[in-house]
Structures are given as C-alpha cells and as structure tokens.
Amino acid sequence: MTTLLRRRLLAVPAVLGLALAAACSNSSSGGGGGASAAATLTGDCAKYQPYAGHSGTKVTMFASILSPESDSLEKSWAEFSSCTGIKISYEGSNDFESQLPVRVSGGNAPDFAIIPQPGLLAQMVKTGKVVKPPAGTVANEDKWSPVWKTYGSVNGTFYAAPMSANMKSLVWYSPKAFKAAGYEVPKTWADMMTLSTKIATSGSMKPWCGGIGSGTATGWPATDWVEEVVLGSYGGDVYDQWVSHQIKFSDPKITGAMKTVADWMQNPAFVNGGIGDVKSIATTTFQDAGAPILAGKCAMLQQASFYRAQWAKGTKISADGDVFAFHLPAVNPQVNNPVEGGGEFLAAFSSRPEVQAVQNYLSSSDWASSRVKVSSGWVSANQGVDKSLYTDPIDKISAEALTDPAATFRFDGSDLMPAAVGAGQEWKSFTAWFAEGQSIQKVAADIDAAWPQ
C-alpha cells in the first residue's frame, strides 16, 4: 500500500491566488453558490468555464497524501480554485485508512476522499455513503484504460475516477557510490543477490535499508515486498488467485515467497544500513528509510516512484547523480517484465453542484496535465496526458513501465484485498513479522483467519 502516506500540506501562497484573480475577469457576478448563474470567465480563466457558477463555495477533501507531495497537489488545482471561486479545503493524515471509516460512519464524511486501496473503496461503498460520479466524470472514461476503471468500480459499478498511478517495482541507489565501488546495476534477481552479498562482505556499507513505519498504515511497504516476489516468481495468474484468496497465504507458493523476502530484507548481513538491525525496519518510517543512501551507509532501497518526493532538497536524481532507480528484476526470469503498480481514486460523499464541478475537473486530462507540470514523482492514469510533459527521469521510467503492453502488470495486492485484510490484518501481521520475529507460518495463518467469510 500503499500508496502515500506523507505530512500535512502547506497552504498555497495568497499571492498566487491574487495574481490569478487579476488575470481572470467576470462579465457577470458568480453569485454565492451552485444555484447562481455561471459567470463568464475570460483570460487565463476561460478554460474553466465548464466548471463555473459556484463562486463562494467550499468542498472538503481528505487523503493520505502528505507534504511535500501534497504541496504540489494543492498547486495543481490552485488556478482552478481561483478562477471558479470554489475553495478546496484539503486535509492529509497518516491515519487516513483508519479515520475515513470512522468519519463516514459518524456522519462526518468529507466531500471527497482520495482512496489508494480499491478494497477500502469497496468498504466505503457498502456504507451507502459514496455518491456515483456525475455524467461529466463518466464521460472522461475513455481517457483511462479499462483496467483502471475496473479498479475504481465495485461489483461492476463505477464510483471513483483514477487520479495517480505509481510504479512500485523500483530500487533506489546512488549511481555515484556504485561507480566509485565498481558496482553494476543488476539485471536479474540472482545478480542482485550476488551484488548484495558482495556489498555486505566489503564491510563499507550494508546493501539494503528499509522502513515500514507509516502511522496506522505501518506495514504496507512489507506487503509490497511480498507482492513483488509473488508476481516476479509465479506471474499474474497465481498473483490474481492469491489476491482473491483462491490461493491462501499458507499456500507453499506464498510462504515460499515470504521466505525469499526474509532471506532478502530480514537478513542481518543485508539490513538495515545506517539505521539498525532487522527489527529497526519496523520502527523506521518509510519516508526516512532512504536517507542512509545519501550518507553512504546503505546501497539500495526498494520503494515506489512516489519516493522521489522524499529525497532532500537539492538531491540530484539522475543516472549519474546522487540517487536514481532501476527496475526490480523478476525472481523467476521466465516471468516477463513484472510491474507492480498502485494508484489513487477520487470518491465523493456529496452530490452538491460544486462537488460535482470539482469531481469533473479532477477526472479530466487538463487537471492531470496540470498535476504533472507542477510535480516530479507523479504519473497519471489518464491517457490524455502528453508524455512529453514528463521531464523527470523517474517519471519517464514509470510512465513507460506502466503503459508497456508486454509487461506483466498487476495492481498492489493488499490494496485489492478486502480492507479488513489488506489494510488491516496483513499490515498488522507483517509488522509483527519484522518487529517481533513472528514465524512465517503464524503470520500466514493469522492473515488467512482474518479473511471475510
């Protein structure tokens, strides 16, 4: 999971709003709410005419996206908000997955939730509180591949438009450190393990660092490691059967994959460079996990494309820079180009006109393009985005992998599982696996027992 899980964002500077307001003029009053006549927008604001007529209104949005990534999220809709007069009040939380159900059941649902787990979306739909998207959002469906619309649907009914897509099958490293030590980027899993042993033997640093801490979502990076190994060992069919629990966690294939992860990320000789022992992985936040690479304390970190936002300001991210990333190799060379991805989906809990206007805009290629322009480390699920807009090298790698028709692509497994499992017992049990050294057999049995009957 998941997917972000970062610090509360900062407000967009007021001067930006003033500048945009000066560039956009209205030939009639926008009024104070959805019932008013739509103002005619001109200048730089003219492109937002389809969303006009709701000036003076406010919508609330709740998500797991935190600063610094959330800063660019707010910037992506700043012009829209200034021109239409619709204020988008955003709140990010590390406890999003646990707090959203509480708020919804307590009658305090936000207007929008950016949900990174299809399993959590299904749980919210069961409450009867999720509102089906308006016609304008549905009309944008041709901008997404069918599989992405499936992830935003529950029992065949479309509820939530996809927003971001992220590439999870990456390994971050320091090209400068690799060059200095004479290391080459591994092309196979066997090569990667051989390199890990070589680095460990050298004594200059540990080959791997990691962290699975993430507030109430602690444990999700460990689920990614197992998912990568299952997909890269057995391919898409076995992965699909596992995600749907046709193959249980206690199945030898899955416990075997967990053993592969244990030999990799629970190997005392391999981890946790610059931080501590194996157990320190459970107490280190995923945001802080990569810092030892820059300090020369560890060589590699398995994390998604969105981790780009966590590197310190001024870090050069390039093939010859301070950090870069390579595609995590398949465990089994017979599996063709395995790619695990994640994403986020916009679900609404209100059908007020201003809410629908925002929902329509955030499902458009125009918004997706705006988001790409103001952010590195973000890739859109919207196929209407011109790929030339991706100037960051990590974004280019991610966009190519996520759209490669020959790849064995699958969505994050724990995000697809029922929320009680994927965002519940699995996170809890995988945390205990690292923090307490619980056995693979117990971890698997506890997760299987939590599966809804």
Image (cartoon, grey):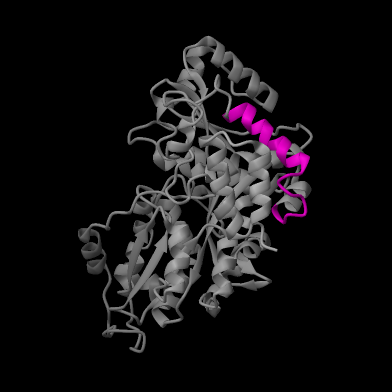
Residue sitting farthest toward the top = 202
- Image coords of residue 219 (percent x, y): 52, 44
- Image coords of residue 270 (percent x, y): 55, 22
Q: Main secondary structure of the magenta part?
A: helix
Is there any visible trace of residue 285 in the rendered image? yes
**In-front residue for pair 297/333:** 297
- Image coords of residue 237 (percent x, y): 78, 49
- The residue depicted at 56 percent of the width and 57 percent of the height is 381
In the figure, 218 relative to 116: above or below?
A: above
- The residue depicted at 48 percent of the width and 58 percent of the height is 97
Q: In the image, is residue 250 part of the stretch drawn in magenta?
A: yes
- Image coords of residue 322 (percent x, y): 42, 26
Q: In the image, is residue 53 part of the stretch drawn in magenta?
A: no
In the figure, 16 relative to 388: above or below?
A: below
Numbered range of the magenta stretch: 243-265
Is there any visible trace of residue 43 in the rendered image? no
In the figure, 351 relative to 196: above or below?
A: below
**In-front residue for pair 182/434:** 434
- The residue depicted at 24 percent of the width and 59 percent of the height is 16
Quadrant for residue 329, please give it: top right
- The residue depicted at 47 percent of the width and 17 percent of the height is 205
Count every numbered label the image shows and give the total.
0
Figure quadrant of the C terminus: bottom right
